[in-house]
Amino acid sequence: MPRTGPRPHCRRYPDPVDHQLFEQWARARAQAHYLGEVWNLTTDEYIQLWRENNRYLNKGRGNENFCLVRNNYDLPWSLDNVKIVTRLQHYQICSREKIGKFALRKRQREEKQNV
């Protein structure tokens, strides 16, 4: 007989919130690995970061939602190099320091000027 439905007794974290944060940690670690970044955050550290002041409740893709970012983009993802900020703050940091897509746009503008 095939199994159907959730099986919380088989999960690493039986608590549904911790289980969801564990899945998000695994996705974030996989993304960092794909981008060639070093990931040193453990699952417990990640869960503790998001559980503090119930920040996981406001995690998302909106400007006022929280996201996990690094303080120094040259260092690996570790507990002493990450912070949780709103996405709006993160975009302001990236545009000011020319990180990510903002660095790409800067390179594209420079290439247009050189042509």
Image (tube, rainbow, N blue to C red):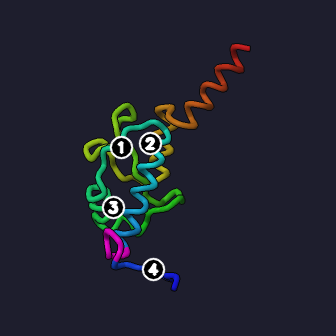
Q: What residue is shown with label 4?
A: 6
Asked if marks 1 and 2 touch (Cβ < 8 Å), the reply is: yes
Closer to us: 4 or 105: 4
* Badge number at residue 89: none
Numbered disc 1: secondary structure? loop
Q: Residue at x 42, y 62 (%)?
A: 23
> What's the distance in space between the residues labelled 2 and 3, CA to CA?
21 Å
Q: Which residue is mark 3?
A: 50
Q: Who's the residue at 41% across and 49% down the image?
A: 29
Quarter of the view holding residue 33: top left
Disc 4 versus disc 2: nearer the observer: 4
Determine which residue is flagged by label 1: 39
Q: Earlier in the sequence, mark 1 or mark 4?
A: 4
Cα separation, mark 1 vs mark 4, equals 29 Å
Q: Is residue 11 left or right of residue 35?
A: left
Tell me: residue 44, above or below residue 98. Answer: below
Q: Which residues are magenta?
A: 10-16
First in residue order: circle 3 vs circle 4: 4
Are the residues flagged by discs 4 and 2 in contact, CB closer than 8 Å? no
Considering depth in this image, is 33 or 56 the residue closer to the camera? 33
Labelled disc at residue 33 = 2
Looking at the rendered structure, the kind of residue marked 4 is Pro
Residue 12: image quadrant is bottom left
Which quarter of the rendering shows the C terminus?
top right
- The residue drawn where x is 35% and y is 75% is 10
In the picture as drawn, the residue positioned furthest to the bottom comes out as 1
